[in-house]
Image (tube, rainbow, N blue to C red):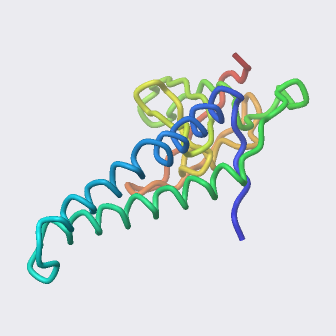
Amino acid sequence: MSKVSYYSPEGLKKLRDELNRLRDIERPKASQAIAEARDKGDLSENAEYDAAKEAQGMLEMRIAKMEEVVSNARIIDESQLDDSKALVHSMVKIKNLTNKMEVTYKLVAQSESDLKTGKISVDSPIGKGLLGKQVGDIAEISVPSGNMKFEILEIWRE
């Protein structure tokens, strides 16, 4: 069974645009590459044909995965969310209790995550550990390097 993911309207539009680009532009390019390679002769010794077929297979897997994600995507009505808890699309300011460093993250769906812009997936260890927490709570999160403790300093919506 597939997992439902929650998106902002912009995030879902970006996902759909990428899926459309793959179907409408990349798929015809892959078919064209196969046709060109096929025209070059004996298929049993044609590495270009094999590579084009493999690339097409990878593209089709990517399209199928994205279609599944889009079909299970839901847009969040942020007006219905509880602003006192860290939820999807919350901005969360946390303090690492070990090194006292403060960081702000936006909790987003996995396909929208981008650490450079401060967006972390709710499926990541830190994202999972922050979900449902309130200001003042301590989130104890198991990460590959051990356990980390974060204090929730602020929660808000953009």
Write down the quadrant of residue 41 in the picture. Answer: bottom left
Q: How many marks?
A: 0
The residue positioned 66% from the left and 40% from the top of the image is: 138
Q: Is residue 1 above or below residue 116?
A: below
Question: Residue 93: image x %, image y %?
Answer: 60, 24
The residue positioned 46% from the left and 54% from the top of the image is: 143
Q: Nearer the viewer, residue 89 or 93?
A: 89
Q: Image quadrant for the N terminus? A: bottom right
Q: Is residue 151 above or below residue 30?
A: above
The residue most toward the top is: 158
Question: Residue 119: image x %, image y %?
Answer: 53, 31
The residue positioned 45% from the left and 25% from the top of the image is: 101
Q: Is residue 9 above or below residue 1?
A: above
The residue most toward the bottom is: 44
Write down the quadrant of residue 150 in the picture. Answer: top right
Question: Residue 54: image x %, image y %?
Answer: 29, 68
The residue most toward the right is: 80
Question: Residue 89: image x %, image y %?
Answer: 69, 31
The residue positioned 29% from the left and 68% from the top of the image is: 53
Horizontal side, residue 122 vs residue 145: left or right? right
Q: Image quadrant for the C terminus? A: top right
Q: Is residue 33 above or below residue 50?
A: above
